[in-house]
Image: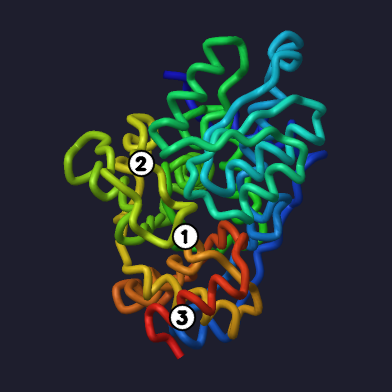
């Protein structure tokens, strides 16, 4: 298993620097008042494609050889990974095919096509991976959404930025889908500041990491029932499970309603419109605030913002949030 280290993350940072944004990490006084602790937000939703995914996509594609570049790439995604891969492929001049389940929200399908990628819709996520593997066997390079050292190292670059901009951070809260983003952040942060506590959060119905931790091995979810579709990996990998198991304080699981409340509070008090996959970090922070020491300084990674106001209004109505 290829190692992911501080050096691979630093190399990734140098490689992708011309292509990605160095997103800001900003203090949020209203959130600090709400939690009773100083809070900063890492605004990764401002990244190209609306989420952190461009980091790993660029690092993987910039690592390809000439023949691999010519053959093109294939990826599986029901959301942000598709946008990140499609954007990176357009910028780098690669042919990209994205395999998506039929249930993928239309904004992701349209956004991916707008970047010039081919979209193939299939019945479900299992069929999507099967088709991607078929295309990879035929010569394309598979850009895995989370189980790829190049992708994980790319995602870890945000951890370097966070520590530079908020060096007094004691606690980082990050959401988990397949575990690639939090694995990269863990590797970067723990290499530089091993005392920092890292907390994961999932939503009910998209809790593949929590189930894997309980079982001691990756568990395939029968279905993704959470509205947080960008957290909807059907399972984590052995690689990401091992990193999270060894370094995360705890993985909290919150209901969708709490994630949507988090979206609303972040819009009102942090002035950013996030996905439930980012809103759940605030839900986790509210659960943790009385467990953390009084000198804690919390960083929330706001991983994505690919959501419409109509989506938010529909969720608020569904959960009776005023």
What residue sits right under mark 2 in the picture? Answer: 234
Residue under the image location 64 percent in, 60 percent down: 45
Q: Is 87 left or right of 262, judged from the image as shown?
A: right
Q: Position of residue 259 (x, y in %)?
A: 42, 70
Whether residue 126 sits left or right of residue 90 in the image: it is: left
Q: Residue furthest bottom?
A: 322
Q: Image height check: is 29 above or below 219?
A: below
86, above or below 35, in the image: above
Disc 1 target residue: 172
Mark yes or no: residue 193 visible: yes
Q: Please, what secondary structure does the residue beneath circle 3 have?
A: helix
Few, some or many residues within 10 Å of mark 1 (<14, 14–19, 20+)? many
Q: Is residue 6 visible?
A: no
Q: Which mark is in front, 2 or 1?
A: 2
Q: Residue at x 55, y 16 (%)?
A: 136
Q: Position of residue 178 (x, y in %)?
A: 42, 42
Residue annotated with mark 3 = 316
Image point 53% across, 39% down: which residue?
A: 100
Q: Report if the CB atoms under discs 2 and 3 are less than 8 Å apart.
A: no
């Amino acid at each position: 298993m290829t190692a992911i280290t501080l050096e691979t993350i630093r190399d990734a940072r140098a490689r992708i620097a011309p292509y990605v944004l160095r997103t800001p990490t900003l203090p949020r006084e209203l959130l600090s008042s709400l939690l009773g602790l100083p809070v900063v937000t890492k605004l990764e939703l401002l990244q190209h494609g609306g989420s952190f995914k461009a980091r790993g996509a660029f690092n993987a594609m910039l690592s390809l050889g000439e023949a691999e570049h010519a053959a093109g790439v294939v990826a599986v995604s029901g959301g942000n990974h598709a946008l990140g891969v499609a954007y990176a492929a357009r910028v780098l001049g690669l042919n990209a095919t994205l395999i998506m389940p039929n249930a993928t929200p239309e904004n992701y399908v349209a956004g991916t096509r707008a970047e010039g990628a081919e979209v193939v819709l299939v019945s479900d996520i299992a069929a999507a991976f099967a088709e991607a593997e078929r295309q990879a066997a035929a010569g394309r390079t598979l850009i895995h959404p989370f189980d790829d050292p190049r992708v994980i190292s790319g995602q870890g670059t945000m951890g370097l930025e966070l520590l530079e901009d908020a060096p007094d951070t004691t606690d980082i809260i990050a959401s988990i889908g397949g575990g690639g983003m939090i694995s990269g952040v863990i590797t970067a942060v723990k290499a530089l500041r091993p005392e920092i506590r890292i907390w994961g959060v999932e939503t009910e119905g998209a809790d593949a990491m929590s189930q894997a931790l309980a079982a001691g091995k990756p568990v395939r979810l029968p279905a993704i029932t959470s509205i947080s579709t960008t957290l909807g990996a059907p399972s984590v990998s052995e690689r990401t499970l091992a990193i999270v198991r060894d370094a995360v304080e705890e993985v909290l699981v919150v209901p969708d309603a709490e994630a949507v409340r988090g979206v609303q509070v972040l819009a009102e008090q942090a002035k950013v419109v996030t996905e439930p996959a980012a809103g759940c970090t605030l839900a986790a922070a509210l659960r943790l605030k009385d467990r953390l020491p009084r000198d804690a300084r919390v960083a929330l990674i706001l991983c994505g913002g690919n959501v419409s106001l109509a989506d938010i209004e529909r969720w608020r109505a569904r959960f009776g949030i005023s």
